Image: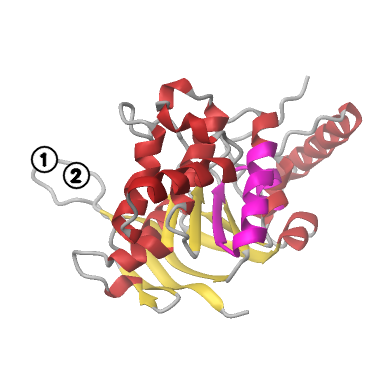
Amino acid sequence: MSDLLRVRGLTVRYPGRRPWPWSPHRPVDAVTGVDLDLEKGRTLGLVGESGSGKSTLGRAVLRLLRPSGGTIRVGEFDVTGFGLRVPLEYRRAVQVVWQDPFGSLHPVRTVGSTLAEPLRIHFGLDGRELRDRVGELLERVGLDADMADRRAHEFSGGQRQRVAIARALAVRPRLLILDEPVSALDVSTQSQVIALLREIQRDTGTAYLFIAHDLAVVRHVSHRIAVMRRGRVVETGPSDRVCDEPAHPYTRALIEAVPEPEPARQRARRAARRTARGTATSGTPETADTPDTSDTES
């Protein structure tokens, strides 16, 4: 399979703050020299703690911000070569599902009108054909077609995320960027949405760039995983290899931060941490920063 997404040397720099009103901005590199590849019909999990640069990378691929350096190619599109206007064909080829489904849906418009807009713009559908296609999209994500007349506040969180997925699928994209798509949902709803995404990928062949901070979730949905830390990719590889045999200390720290429901394993992990802390105190330096998550141990 050929690569659908190719990122080479990507750098994204923000102006940063001014130490004094009369001084220049101090630039901040949110992403530095990142290389990524994603094949057609596959899922690449992009994982890292808050502030690692993973969402910034996703926005650069979407062309919601202009990279400071490097190249991004999606199929035949040279994303970094776009001018001020992004081609409509690229907007159709690459879609996004955001973390907050309520914030990404119009609060006043009905769900049906939200789904109808991209169908009208990209395919020129109207009338009965348009209504039928909206109903098909809702049913495709596990909702009833007669829910098209409801508004966002009339849905649960999981249902709103299904609507957001349906809107992204309306234009039949080749690449879907999923930015923390299940982190705002409860565990049971997470599993349902993940199962839906895997089913859609199997049926449509859409490639996913799955951005999340939860390595356990990323492992279940991804064929490959890239771990980001401080704007750089520190490790990439098949999902099972990265999770079972991590090569980078930061990846190991992320894995150890995943909550462990088994009491016996919690105690074993706690003992291992005490041993590691004792070793570090006796003179061995730490090799990686610990992510800002922790076990819910009792």
Residue indicated by mark 1: 21
Q: Residue at x 11, y 40 (%)?
A: 21
Residue 57 drawn at (x, y percent): 43, 58
Three-letter amino acid code at the position of disc 1: Pro
Q: Nearer the viewer, residue 104 or 222?
A: 104
In the visual, does 119 lie left or right of 183? left
Query: Looking at the figure, which quarter contains the C terminus?
Result: top right
- At mark 2, the secondary structure is loop
Residue 271 drawn at (x, y percent): 85, 34
In the visual, does 274 lie left or right of 287? right
Residue 16 drawn at (x, y percent): 26, 48
- At mark 1, the secondary structure is loop
* Disc assigned to residue 18: 2
Marks 1 and 2: CB-CB under 8 Å?
yes
Q: Is residue 141 magenta?
A: no
Q: Which residues are magenta?
A: 191-219
Query: Looking at the figure, which quarter contains the N terminus?
Result: bottom right
In the visual, does 113 lie left or right of 195? left
Residue lying furthest right: 264
Q: Is residue 291 visible?
A: yes
Q: Nearer the viewer, residue 180 or 108?
A: 108
Q: Is residue 195 magenta?
A: yes
From what the image shows, is residue 277 above or below residue 239?
A: above
From what the image shows, is residue 34 above or below residue 215?
A: below
* Colouring chosen for the image of the structure: secondary structure
Question: Within 10 Å of the Cα at label 1, are there few (<14), some (14-19), or many (20+) other Cα atoms?
Answer: few
